Image (cartoon, helix red, strand yellow):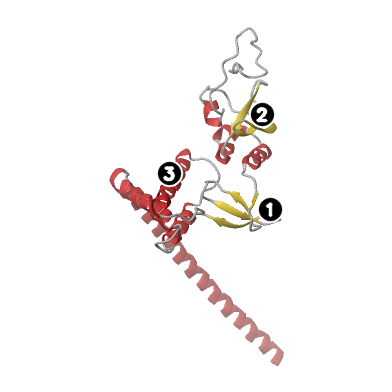
Amino acid sequence: MAYFIPSDTPLNPTEARAHAAPAAGPRTPANHLKDGVTKPIRLLALGTGEYGKTALLEFPGGWQRTIDLPTEADAWHPLFSELSQEDCAKLRSHAAPPVIRRPDGTRTRRGALSFITKDIHRGRWVKRVNSFDVPAENGCAGSVTGYRCAAELLDALARDYGPCIDKRDIIKAALQACNEPYGKPSRRNAGLAFMDIVEEALNFMAKHAKHREYMAAKIAQAEHVQAYMADHDAREKAAFVERMKAAKAAKRSKAQRSDA
């Protein structure tokens, strides 16, 4: 089988051809796929480069290339679907943000988005996830922060890959921020700006998406689950009643034998 081997790979056998000029900016998984090359099959080494974390990978045909991983989401790119589970785990662990010790002694790590942080226990397990960890700001500054958070979330969802993002927890946390005191630095304006985009998203869906078909399907699904659970509960209750009757009958039979 013939493989396409980029001219910038260190194992490129076509030495007579001039090397291609280095790509401008990081060679992320998405940029790599623009070359039309195949997916890597083995992780060779992990490192750090100009744009952050890197991974040296082997491709079909034996050639190698270093891929930049400037964000944690890059390590979850579909490009790496041919790697073993062990290699994928190493790649994602390598790209995960470092644990930071704050002045108050708490240890935190950035989550899937810049405004999500995780409080880390000394044993390195997650104690708590802060889903809307934004600074306390006045007025317009808070609004800018909230809109930037919403833009970052939308960009992440548009990629359709990356670490799990709990949208429900983010919205809950943003709503809590909306209730913070008015008139002093707080997360209130950031929360209000973020929820403004959530409201607009509903308006956009109502006007531009096939929401009637979608909602009809969701309602039908919920009704199906409701009917199933009602039937399941009825069966469980009937089975419980039968077990109780059988237990009482067995107890009476045992008592009668003892009397005899």
The vertical placement of 30 against 141, above or below, is: above
The vertical placement of 242 against 178, above or below, is: below
Is residue 260 at all visible to an observer of this figure? no
Question: Residue 104, percent across and down?
Answer: 64, 58
The vertical placement of 85 against 37, above or below, is: below
Q: Residues within 10 Å of mark 3 (few under 14, many from 20)?
A: some
Instruction: Say which quarter of the image contains residue 88.
Output: top right
Q: Quadrant of the N terminus?
A: top right
Q: Which of marks 3 and 2 precedes in the sequence?
A: 2
Q: Quadrant of the C terminus?
A: bottom right
Residue drawn where x is 56% and y is 32% of the image: 79
Q: Any mark on residue 56, and which?
A: 2
Residue receiving disc 3: 151
Q: SS of the residue at dot 1?
A: loop
Q: Residue furthest left?
A: 207
Give how far apart the Cα atoms at labels 2 and 3 are: 31 Å
Q: Any mark on residue 124, and which?
A: 1
Question: Residue 172, percent across and down?
Answer: 46, 59
Q: Residue furthest top?
A: 16
User: What amino acid type is highlighted by mark number 1?
Assistant: Arg
Give how far apart the Cα atoms at labels 3 and 1 are: 30 Å
Residue drawn where x is 51% and y is 49% of the image: 115
- Check if mark 2's residue and mark 3's residue have beta carbons within 8 Å: no
Q: Which of marks 1 and 3 precedes in the sequence?
A: 1
User: What amino acid type is highlighted by mark number 2?
Assistant: Leu
Residue drawn where x is 53% and y is 51% of the image: 116
Name the foreground residue: 129 vs 206.
129
Question: Residue 90, percent across and down?
Answer: 67, 39
- Check if mark 3's residue and mark 1's residue have beta carbons within 8 Å: no
Q: SS of the residue at dot 2?
A: strand
Residue drawn where x is 64% and y is 45% of the image: 98
